[in-house]
Image (tube, rainbow, N blue to C red):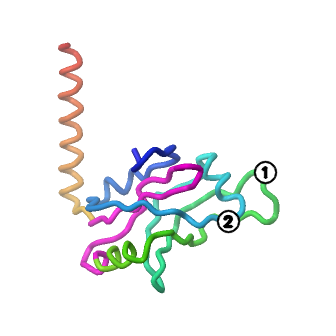
Amino acid sequence: MPKGNGNLITENRKARHEYTVLDTVEAGIVLQGTEIKSIRNHQINLKDGYASVSRNEMWLYNVHIAPFKEGNQFNHDPLRKRKLLLHRREIDSLLGQVQQDGITLVPLKVYIKNGVAKVLIGLAKGKKQYDKRETIKRREQERRIRREYKDRY
């Protein structure tokens, strides 16, 4: 569940499979026009998204927010880059960590908190193929143990 009390909209499951998440930070998203309506309708895809620092500002790229169905010709561009709202010290800290080899920023969750859209950004390091296989094996073992425990009791 997101930090604080929020209404979960979507989660990036691929990120947990592809990356080891080292740390997370919550950020607001600057939205245009009907984007919030599309988000509230769960019309958002984080699969290929990533965050980056450009000119001392944090930006979110490749996150698809579908155009609002009941919108007009002023609907938003689905793949436009979106500014993230973070404090200067948070941006500086993330920038310092991202400059290390293999570290990237990926969106993990989008949720509504106090009426405002928030994104949970993860500071992540890419997994190797054998790490992914190990994670799958461990998850299968945990499932099997839970199933056996449930059948016994």
Residue that label 1 marks: 70
Residue 65, picture quadrant:
bottom right
Where is residue 128 shown, x and y percent of the image? 22, 63
Mark nearest the camera among 1 and 2 is 2
Residue that label 2 marks: 32
**Residue at left 22%, top 48%?**
135
Give the extent of the magenta segment: 97-125
* Structural distance between the alpha carbons of marks 1 and 2: 15 Å
Mark 2: amino acid: Gln
Magenta stretch: dominant SS?
strand
Left or right of 38 on screen, residue 107: left
| Numbered badge on residue 31 | none
Where is residue 146 shown, x and y percent of the image? 22, 27
In this rendered view, identify the residue nearer to me: 69 or 144. 69
Label 2: few (<14), some (14–19) or many (≥20) C-alpha neighbours in 10 Å: few
Q: Secondary structure at mark 2?
A: loop
Where is residue 149 shown, x and y percent of the image? 18, 21
Mark 1: amino acid: Glu
In this rendered view, identify the residue nearer to me: 30 or 139. 30
